[in-house]
Amino acid sequence: MTPMELGDRVERGENIHTEFKEARVHPDAVAAALVAFANTDGGELLVGVADDRTISGVADTDRVMRVSPRCSSGRRNLEPGSDRTAGLVLRWMRLPRAG
């Protein structure tokens, strides 16, 4: 995801395919979002963004990414990534629709 695409996602806000979580997200919240995406048409979880679209960024990016493998056991199509927007690092996870 490019910085421009990331900025557009944040600007559009949350919907059935986009979920925002702040940096200090609990693994259960990540798991719940990924399960919801897997049971629908897929989606993207953006970590470092508040529900009101405020970008706070992620200081400990490694901690966030260590959560994702535990939340996607058996799913090899979870696409993690990171990028900068507004000078802050955001982490994202894209999960396509289950086949």
Image (cartoon, grey):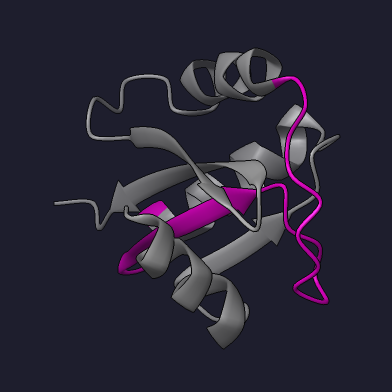
The residue nearer to you, when weighing 93 against 72, is 93
In the image, residue 44 lies at what x, y percent?
44, 57
Tell me residue 7's x, y (percent): 51, 69
| Observer able to see residue 58 | yes
- Relative to residue 96, is residue 90 depicted above or below? above
From what the image shows, is residue 19 above or below residue 52? above
69 left or right, relative to 49: left
Residue 50, above or below 38:
below
- Tell me which residue sits at (13%, 51%) in the image: 99
Q: Main secondary structure of the magenta part?
A: loop
Residue 39 visible somewhere in the drawing: no
As drawn, the residue found furthest toward the left would be 99
- Give the percent coordinates (x, y) of residue 74: 32, 20
Outermost bottom residue? 12
**Residue depicted at x 65% and y 40%:** 30
Pinpoint residue 79: horizontal percent, then vertical percent: 31, 36
Bounds of the magenta segment: 38-60
Q: Residue at coordinates 32% horizontally, 53% vertically from top-left?
A: 1
Left or right position of 35 against 75: right
Residue for point 59% across, 13% down: 66
